[in-house]
Amino acid sequence: MASKKLNVVQIVPELEEGGVEGETVELAIHLARCGHRSIVISGGGRLVPLLERNGCEHLLWPCIGEKSARCLKYIKKLRHLFVEEKIDVVHLRSRLPGWIGYLAWNMLPDDSRPALVTSFHGFYSVNQYSTIMTKGEKVIAVSKTIRDHILQNYHVEPDRIELIHGGFEVQCFDPDLVEPDRVDALRQQWQLVGNHFPVIVLPGRLTQWKGQEVFIDSLNLIRDLPFIALCVGDIDENQSFTRRLRDKIASYGLDDKIRLVGHCADMPAAMLVADVVVSASSSQPEAFGKVAIEAMAMGRPVIATAHGGSLETVVDGTTGWLVPPSDPQAMAEAIRQALADQARLRRMGAEGKEWATRHFTAALMCSKTVDLYTRLLEEKEAKRTGRRFTVVQMLPELEGGGVERGTLEVGRYLAGKGHRSIVVSGGGRLVVQLEREGSRHVTWSVGSKSPLSLRYVLPLRRLLQKEKVDILHLRSRMPAWVGYLAWKSLPPHRRPILVTTFHGFYSVNAYSAIMTRGMEVIAVSESIKKHIRERYGRKEGVTLIFRGVDIQQFAAEHVDPMRVESLRQQWGIAAGQPLVMLPGRLTRLKGQDVFIKCLAMLRHQDFQAVLVGDTDENPGFVEELKQLATKSGLAGKVMMVGHCSDMPAAYALADVVISASSSEPEAFGRTSIEAMAMGKPVIATAHGGSLETVVDQETGWLVQPSDPVDMARALDEALSMESPRLAAFGEKGKRRVREHFTTESMCEQTETLYRQLLGERRALAPA
């Protein structure tokens, strides 16, 4: 892909002067010089000959930037151009042409569309019309300020935004390449011959937000100083504003000091006429501020208003001055300082030249843009062939628990493989980790068992379409209903592959049956697979993928002893006493009450016991457990330590780990394999997934569910066992986990299933 010659179309309203136009031309010429086919569509302008002299093609479409119905004829024409000229990349740089280009692009079949890039060049008014500049498959922000503006005001995921600063043309803006007669010609044109006063130049369109009025007000405050000030910009473009500026200059009696010199075709020479250059944008910040970097490239210090892109281009006190916007007093003071010290001006000019050359050249901008084109085309090709895909996982929340951790693990794996991973949930403590590991999170309360959850059906439908989702993976019942309804509402050929994971022994009813509606259903254990077959009648399209544990994270040798000691002190665990641990949500299904009853039968044994799980989630049951422990004479031996964010250290602290699920079996039993991975023997109830993870009398003990007597028998045996023999149980458990139950294996099998399903779909698609 890197060596392929591209066909690139850029679309702008016109090609007169301005930052957008300049960058368009610079990129177009760069593309042509690199051997690509470079096409620019515009309504024409003075920059067209420069384009054509440098090997670019210009298509003159007179109404492309005109806000009238006449521009609509170009939609069909542009669509035809994309197809006939085999365009690889379409780059939209302005709003109205952006809509024309986007509508033409959107009319094409997905697999025939060129790569779509938009450049967000300004602080457009935030409305539906301006959203077009965020519709690119990649959105270029021309400054960090613009990137923040997009994120704050538009629904654009951060990974679609690419920061590419604008740049100056080194061959143009180099003081060593500007002949003295060019500078002399301008000095003569602007009546500066014989002038020995410092010259202050403000380049830019004559418009209120560019700050020429503030500039004039500031000059009036220092009228006692010797200077000549020049406002460089077309005086015919906005004639009413030009008259306003002239009236203001006259009212101050500054006609001999301030001049409106009109358009300048030789800005490098204009910068050399100046001693200091001003960028005075006021009511609206510069999105990037090309004037500043061009001035610095020419060795001239800059006075700029401290907002927008100027905060990134001008280094206050080093390459110039930053002053508050719309503050004539502050600007006057900066100009006064500048004019007072010529040596400082020269020093700042040299610093600015080095700074601009290092960070803001057109070559750097163009190189980054072409690299973006190439990466986007590679992503599209990888997506088309199934090498890269986009996955949305849905679940109620991201607090703690096996389903949540499995979601994070798959998300991390997918992101690491270059796929796009999106997770939809109601949020929670794990969101920060999820996003840090490369997934995007969408916060919607899709887990609430209320009709209100259905309000997310349409937003989800839009998300699936907008993000071109390949796999929709549903992991819990209420989110699954939301996901299924959104999926079902799409035309069949636009639906992603629908996958569900059956994580538990849900009550058998129509509500739970949603977990069998996937095009493929993942069962997390043989027990669950059997449950699906026997209770729902689904025999085909069910894949067994055991849950897994991260054997790098859950490895005793990787747990710093300081973490274990810190947890011991935090929980108040005495050294030297065996510690029995039951991790899991504090709910009757997890069997903490059975565990406490079991402990009451072992008061002859020397032990401490901890229940690890959030004590705020189910306060009624927590109080019941406390009373049961007190009544059983275990108040000092059983502790509820709350949520633990460092479970590897917790397992390292334990001697025996319990999985006591009672009225409902564990679908898989993640607690057991985490403990086994840490080399700890496990006592688990003999139903559900535990029958597949724990080997009785080898890696631990299997006991009858809801039977405190049988659990007490096993725990008594464990606590009475010699340490080497107990350690042997742990070693066998560790070996079993590494052979059968790793996160890596789970994620690899999940990715393989995704690929298989996508491959089957492509094979069935019409040629």
Image (spheres, grey):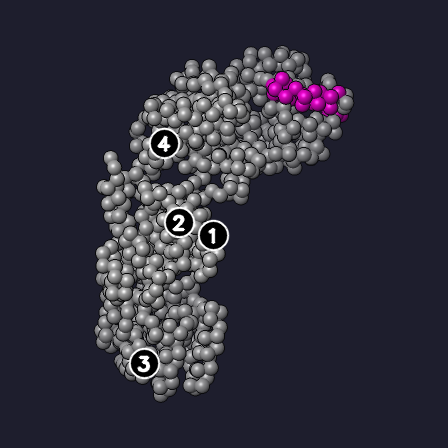
In magenta segment, residue 237:
yes
CA neighbours of label 2 inside 10 A, class few (<14), some (14 to 19), many (20+) = many
Q: Amino acid at mark 4?
A: Leu
Q: Earlier in the sequence, mark 1 or mark 4?
A: 4
Residue stretch in magenta? 222-250
Q: Which residue is mark 2?
A: 486
Mark 1, residue position: 455
Query: Does label 1 or label 2 sit earlier along the sequence?
Result: 1
Instruction: Provide residue 720's location: percent of width, then percent of height.
Output: 29, 83
- On the image, numbered disc 4 is attached to which residue? 108
Label 2's element? helix
Q: Residue at x 53, y 34 (%)?
A: 129
Q: Residue at x 43, y 84 (%)?
A: 634
Is tag 2's residue or tag 3's residue first in the polypeptide sequence?
A: 2
Estimate the x, y position of residue 78 in percent, counting from the top left.
41, 25
Mark closest to the chain's N terminus, 4 or 2? 4
Amino acid type, mark 2? Ala
Corner quadrant of residue 248 = top right
Cα–Cα span, label 2 and label 3? 44 Å
Residue hosting label 3: 707
Residue 101: image x %, image y %?
44, 29
Which element is circle 1 on?
Answer: helix
**Horizontal and vertical percent position of residue 419:** 34, 45
Kindly indicate whether the residue at mark 3 contacts the one at mark 2 (C-beta within 8 angstroms).
no
Q: Nearer the viewer, mark 1 or mark 3?
A: 1
Query: What amino acid does circle 3 point to?
Result: Asp
Horizontal side, residue 177 vs residue 539: left or right? right
